[in-house]
Image (cartoon, coloured by chain):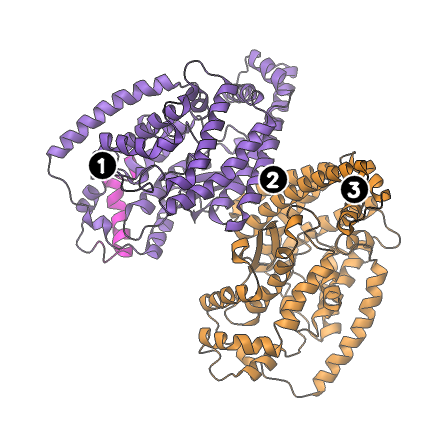
Chain colours: A purple, B orange
């Protein structure tokens, strides 16, 4: 039995945690709507609304009460592992947030609120110069974050820690060095062998049938359609608006089978993790997972280990033949299975094969750390990206849309996030 | 010139007003999403999120500072009519809100958060008994509101005042008595004349073509599609998520032309009012209109005075013929114009003709005031509704879906709202 005092102190923490989680999800509703529905002229006021919520969240996370409360509970050796995790999470969060000011987090929210639509436009027009002023301000703010939060060796440590707690830049560097060596060797070996045929993946796949396909597959994967939904966005994602309201998005490419199909399976991996938490954690911050790397391990597992497996192909191939009679007319399950597992360096990360995928992460990690320590200026990103792409993949992007503008994460202020994808592959 | 002190006090009020407006619109985003997107299992947590925002709004509206601030500014005889309106609005709002507690407004928000989906289900199944427990709690809470807020003569005064400030139940009663007399006489006269043909309105109007039609008409009416959108819901509405993000919704009926067409024109009337505010009032609470009655006057004006006019029909009829070649094959503009203006008592308010429309409001007003003063029990609503329907229209609903369950407003806690529709017809 826990002493009465710890019991009631724990309840206090859980009440605060519930209020914080609720507010974070309200913010997620605004962000989801921003990506799926927001009319173009609504961008600036939405950024102000998000900034207001970020300010409120900051107030909740740094309420002075939390310092002594979490310190006291950390000393109390609680019997439940869940309770200990909750205390640790809030103690870390409190210490970190207390080093930032409300004004700072609001400024940051306002910036990324307008940076995302600016990125979407720049990407559409394949013109980095439109996004540069935003990237400059974002890098500046993230360096300020690192300075305020503090770090042992590299300013990037302070960002990485949000997504992969207790992991340092040096840890990632070492893992990635080993990974690069292994992947490069593997790719070279693969190159010496006859290449499999995947031309059929680039035939015409009508959007309506793609949608019918994934909507039929979703429940088969275990996605609860009464507690979630699927929508369309420029950049696919999964977000949790409530423990019983987990939403995924995808984009449709009528000339390429993979993006929507494997994209949806990937996001469903995230969604299954979110829908799978113990209902008693419904409005708890613990119901967001251990780390983003672990989260990605779930999505990458479903996308690659399940989605690209022979057994899964055997199961869904009849359904695919039914929906795409023309594109798959002379394709059998074996050919399909080999085609979706073809390994070949390419430009777009989210469409990359399982082997070369981590090289995309490596590239971004090197640029991000260089941006953070000042050895790379934002204006030089396109050149540096293209050089590194040539070195790692033997491919030079012909424009910024298939190069440095392909991902939304920097526009979201998500520097430090990318490594979790590669870590997710390894977990 | 305003004295320096009033100038800076006014700035204080405007800052508070901006924060309140922003939070109210964040709440509107959650409500819009609730009606358009929310997965069924997400209902309860969404109600908690709405309650949390309602609690925050209550805190903002009742911050002690606002009492002396608005009182002082009310004395200061400000030269700008806008500034005076802002002060008056907040003074009234502060006095009203201060009589309610945060706990009470949260409780109310939580209740209507779950009552709306319950109403939607009850309506689908035409089963009032499923909605009864919610209606009982809502009436109880609204009576408590009236008791807390206070009123001169009738508890309903306290609710009406939110939507139509400074108007009393007695005012409405007198207006409606006169209105009833006039309408009943007019309907009797119309009955003695040969009826116009409107059978063509009940042919098949494919949903996709209805949608194409209204999307083509929206910009013609002046709706800015970059600063708003159109979506589908069970009960049509217009809501403002930002001064440049005004959203309308509609429902589609393939067997009846009117609901989507005139419904969209009606909601566009609301939207034009919202999109038309001076941009300098972008995040001000003044940018929500003078009263709900005035708001309805705009939507009813566009729906009836414009939308059912001969000039408008002449303008849109070629477009309608293009989209509905079969349904309108042997119909000309004159027949169409007469058909959409046919007067005939019917069950559904939102589909009623211009003449009998206000009788629907009268019916609801009588039931609402009776619920509030206790002379009608919620359980007796279906019977009372049907009796009154028979008396006013000569029609008895065959089930609750075409009777007392047809509107969402009670489930939204919107008792006191209905009279504004009839007042809107009169302004």
Measured from the top left, where is residue A39 in percent x and y? 51, 51
Residue A68 appears left or right of B140: left
Residue B26 appears left or right of A417: right
Measured from the top left, where is residue A64 in percent x and y? 64, 20
The chain letter under disc 1 is: A
Between B177 and A172, the residue placed more toward the observer is A172
Local secondary structure at mark 2? helix
Let me know if marks 1 and 2 both belong to one chain.
Answer: no
Task: Tell me, yes or no, whether the highlighted magenta stretch contains residue B48.
Answer: no
Question: Quadrant of the rendered structure where residue A153 is?
Answer: top left
Residue B250 against residue B68 in the figure, above or below: below
Q: What's the residue at 75%, 62% (across, down)?
A: B419
Specify whether residue B379 is in view. yes
Residue identified by numbered label 3: B94
Residue B49 shows which numbered tag? 2
Task: Tell me, yes or no, whether the highlighted magenta stretch contains residue A307.
Answer: yes
Local secondary structure at mark 1? loop
Residue A395 shows which numbered tag? 1
For the stretch drawn in magenta, what is the main secondary structure?
A: helix
Residue B58 shows which numbered tag? none
Determine whether label 2 and label 3 are within 8 Å by CB: no
Cα–Cα gap, marks 1 and 2? 48 Å
Q: What's the residue at 72%, 64% (across, down)?
A: B424
Cα–Cα gap, marks 2 and 3? 23 Å
Between A206 and B106, the residue placed more toward the observer is A206
Which residues lie in the magenta part?
A: A305-328
Measured from the top left, where is residue B104 in percent x and y? 74, 40
Specify whether residue B401 is in view. no
Residue B348 appears left or right of A358: right
* Of the two numbered discs 2 and 3 in the rendering, the one whose residue sits closer to the viewer: 3
The chain letter under disc 2 is: B
């Amino acid at each position: 039995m826990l002493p009465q005092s710890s019991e009631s102190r724990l309840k206090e923490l859980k009440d605060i945690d519930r209020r914080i989680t609720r507010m974070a999800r309200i913010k997620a509703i605004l962000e989801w709507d921003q990506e799926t529905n927001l009319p173009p002229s609504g961008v600036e006021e939405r950024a102000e609304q998000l900034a207001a919520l970020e300010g409120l969240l900051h107030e909740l996370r740094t309420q002075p009460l939390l310092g002594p409360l979490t310190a006291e509970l950390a000393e109390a050796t609680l019997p439940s592992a869940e309770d200990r995790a909750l205390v640790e999470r809030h103690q870390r969060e409190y210490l970190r947030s207390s080093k930032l000011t409300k004004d700072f987090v609001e400024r940051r929210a306002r910036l990324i609120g307008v940076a995302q639509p600016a990125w979407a436009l720049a990407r559409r027009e394949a013109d980095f110069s439109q996004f540069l002023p935003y990237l400059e301000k974002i890098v500046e703010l993230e360096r300020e974050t690192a300075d305020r939060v503090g770090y042992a060796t590299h300013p990037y440590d302070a960002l990485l820690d949000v997504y992969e707690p207790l992991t340092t830049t040096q840890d990632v560097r070492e893992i990635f060095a080993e990974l690069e060596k292994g992947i490069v060797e593997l790719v070279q070996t693969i190159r010496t062998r006859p290449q499999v045929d995947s031309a059929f993946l680039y035939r015409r796949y009508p959007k309506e049938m793609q949608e019918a396909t994934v909507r039929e597959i979703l429940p088969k994967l275990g996605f609860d359609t009464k507690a979630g939904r699927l929508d369309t966005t420029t950049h696919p994602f999964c977000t949790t608006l409530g423990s019983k309201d987990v939403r995924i998005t995808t984009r449709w490419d009528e000339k390429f089978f993979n993006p929507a199909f494997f994209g949806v399976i990937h996001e469903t991996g995230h969604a299954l993790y979110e829908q799978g938490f113990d209902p008693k954690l419904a409005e708890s911050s613990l119901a967001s997972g251990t780390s983003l790397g672990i989260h990605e391990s779930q999505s990458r597992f479903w996308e690659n280990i399940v989605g690209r497996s022979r057994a899964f192909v055997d199961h869904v191939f009849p359904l695919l033949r039914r929906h795409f009679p023309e594109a798959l007319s002379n394709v059998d399950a074996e050919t399909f299975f080999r085609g979706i597992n073809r390994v070949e360096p390419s430009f777009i990360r989210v469409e990359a094969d399982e082997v070369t995928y981590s090289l995309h992460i490596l590239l971004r990690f090197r640029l991000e750390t260089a941006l953070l320590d000042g050895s790379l200026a934002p204006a030089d990103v396109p050149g540096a990206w293209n050089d590194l792409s040539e070195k790692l993949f033997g491919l030079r992007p012909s424009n910024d849309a298939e190069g440095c503008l392909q991902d939304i994460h920097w526009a979201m202020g998500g520097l430090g996030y990318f490594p979790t994808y590669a870590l997710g592959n390894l977990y």
